[in-house]
Amino acid sequence: MDRRGARSLPARIRRTAHERVVAPPVRGARRGAGWTADRDRLPTSVRAVLSYFARGGRLDLSALRLRPTVEDRVEAMVREAFDPVEAALAEEFGVPRQEVRFEYDTKLLMPAELALARRYRDLAREASDGFDPVEREVNPGLLGKVPLPAALAGESDPIGGEFSDLIRAVERAEEVTRFVVAALLDGDMRDAINDDEYGDFRTTIPDADPPRVARVAQSTLAERVEAGFERYPDEVRAAYDRAVATSEAHQDRDERFRSLLEDARDGDPGAEDRIRAEYRDAGFEDPPDAFRSRDLDLPYFRSQYARVGVIYTGMIEMYRAAGVPLDEAFERSVVLAIVGAQVWLDDVDDFEADMREGQLTPVTAEYLLADSDGEAHDRVVELTDRYLDRAREYADASDSTLNGIAVEYIHRSGNPDVLPR
C-alpha cells in the first residue's frame, strides 16, 4: 500500500500499524542510544547527540550537518574581531604585527552559534529542492554541485534571480552574528576587567602586562561595536543598552549579596530569610516579555536572569531589531539553558572558591539554606534539572534540534561529585 492509501486508514488502525511497525524499532534504538550515551569513553559531544535522541528528540540530520559549518563560521568571525586587537597590541607594545597572536577564552558564544544555526535551518527549509542557501550552491546540478552566485549570477545582479532573497537573508544573519559576536566579546571582557580577572586574555607578546593587554583588547573591540551600531536601526542599540543596564544593576548589588552570605555564616538568625527573599525567591518588578509565569517562578530566576540570562535576551532582541527573526520558544530555551549552565558548570566547579571568597551563587546559597550537605547537594541537582528540563521543553517547542543537543551537552558536562555531601 502506498502512502496515500495509508493516510486514508482510520486513525486507530494507522496508529496501531505505526506502533507495530515503527515504534518498537524506534524505542529499541532510543534505548540503545541512551545506553551508549552513558559510556564515558565517548566524547561529550557524541554522548549529547545520543542522549538527545534517547530522550525523544528528533534526529534532524540537516541540523546536525549545520553544526560544524556554524562553528567554523563563528570561529572565523572571532578571528576577524581579533585582527584589529592584534594590530592595536602590536602598536601598544612596539612589536611586529606578524608576531602578535591574541586569544580570549569565553563560553559566551554558544547562543550566537545556536541563533545562526536556527536561521540557517529556517532558510534552508524555505529553499526549493536542490538549492542550499547556506553553502550558496545547487545540488544536484547537471554537473553535480554548482556554486552560487558565480554559476547563476547575471552581469547586473551579483546574485542570481530566484535565489537572491534567500542568499541575502543568509548574509544578513551572518552580518548580524558577526556584530553580535563582537558585542558579546566586548561585554565579557569588560566584566572580566571589572572583576580583575585576566587569566582568559592570552597573547604571544613576551612578558606583556595582562591588565594592559586586557584594556587594549576591550577598548579596541568597544570601538568596533560602537561604530557597528551606525549600520543598524536605533532599536538594536536600545536592546543592547537594556541588557547592559540590567546586568550592571545586578553587579552593583554584589556587595549586598556578599553581606547576606557573611551574615548567614556568622549565624545571623534572619540572614537565611533575607537570602530567600532577596536572592532565591525575588520577583520581577518588570518581568521580561518572553517568559511565562511558570518560568518567572523558578528559584533564583530573577537574580540569574540579571546575572547571565539578560545578555542573551538582549542578543536575541538585537537579531530581531536587525531583521533576523527568532521565536520566543527559542529565546526561552537559550536563556534557561544558559542559566542552568551557569549553575551546573561554573557555580558547581567554583563552589569552594566562592565560599572562601564570600560569593553568593545559587550553589553557595543552597549550602547555606539546607540542613545538611547532602540535602544541599540534592537541591543543586534538582535545581539544575528544573532549568534544563524547561530548556529542553522549549527547544522542542521551537523545533530546534541543536538547542536540545546543547542542553544535553550542558547536562553531561557537569560534575556534581565535586560538591560536599
Image: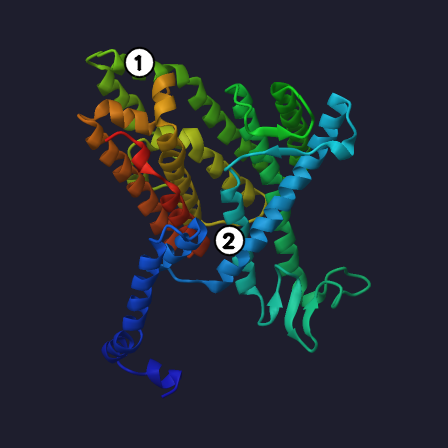
**What is the x, y in percent for residue 305?**
40, 32
Place of residue 118 in the rendered image (x, y in percent of width and height, measured from the top left): 51, 53
Instruction: Kindly give the residue lying farthest to the front in the view shown.
Output: 41
Indicate left or right for 203 with 126 as reference.
right
Question: Looking at the image, which residue is at 35% across and 86% down?
Answer: 5
- Residue lying at 36% horizontally and 88% vertically, measured from the top left: 1
- Residue 73 in picture, x, y percent from top left: 62, 49
| SS assignment at label 2 | helix
Identify which residue, 163 or 260, lies in the foreground: 260
Amino acid type for the residue under numbered disc 2: Arg
- Residue topped by disc 2: 118
Can you tell which of label 1 and label 2 is closer to the viewer?
A: 1
Which residue in the protein does label 1 denote?
A: 262
For the point 58% across and 55% down, which residue is it?
69
Q: Position of residue 112 (x, y in %)?
A: 53, 44
Question: Which of disc 2 and disc 1 is earlier in sequence?
Answer: 2
Crowdedness near tag 1: few (<14), some (14–19) or many (≥20) residues, C-alpha within 10 Å: some
Mark 1 and mark 2 in contact? Answer it, CB < 8 Å: no
Instruction: Give the image quarter of residue 158.
Output: bottom right
Identify the coloring.
rainbow
